[in-house]
Amino acid sequence: MKAKLDEEVGEFIDEPNEEELADILEVIESIKKFKEFDDEKIIELKKKKFEKRGGFDSKIILDEVND
């Protein structure tokens, strides 16, 4: 599934459209099912990360962290 995800992400990078994004989501759903990951836990982890680090809505990406 990792190779398939890499393939689908590559296709999205080459052609960023809804169809390619849908393929990525399909692979992610398959990984979640195979690994028996809990949707609620994933959502909670996503929320905590957003609260700690922010999101990507403003398109600002952290390149490095200096301690």
Image (cartoon, grey):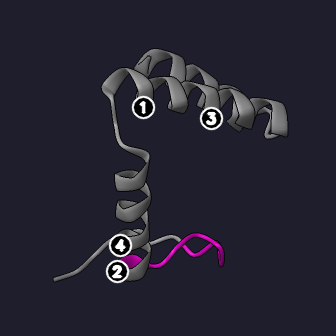
Q: Amino acid at mark 3?
A: Leu
Q: Is residue 6 left or right of residue 51?
A: right
Q: Amino acid at mark 4?
A: Lys
Q: Secondary structure at mark 3?
A: helix
Q: Which image quarter: residue 41?
A: bottom left
Q: Is residue 67 left or right of residue 12?
A: left
Q: Residue at label 4?
A: 48
Q: Residues within 10 Å of mark 2 (few under 14, many from 20)?
A: few
Q: Residue at label 1?
A: 32
Q: Earlier in the sequence, mark 4 or mark 1?
A: 1
Q: Earlier in the sequence, mark 3 or mark 1?
A: 3
The residue that appears at 41% across and 68% down in the rendered structure is 63
Q: Position of residue 18 (x, y in %)?
A: 83, 39
Segment colored magenta: 52-60
Q: Amino acid at mark 1?
A: Lys
Q: Position of residue 7 (x, y in %)?
A: 58, 20
> Which label sits in the foreground, 2 or 4?
4
The residue that appears at 41% across and 21% down in the rendered structure is 2
Are discs 3 and 1 less than 8 Å apart at CB? no
Q: Which image quarter: residue 59?
A: bottom right
Q: Estimate the spatial distance between the alpha carbons at disc 3 and disc 2, rounded to whole Å.
A: 25 Å
Q: Amino acid at mark 2?
A: Lys
Q: Residues within 10 Å of mark 1 (few under 14, many from 20)?
A: some
Q: Residue at label 3?
A: 25
Which numbered dot is residue 58? none
Q: Residue at label 2?
A: 52
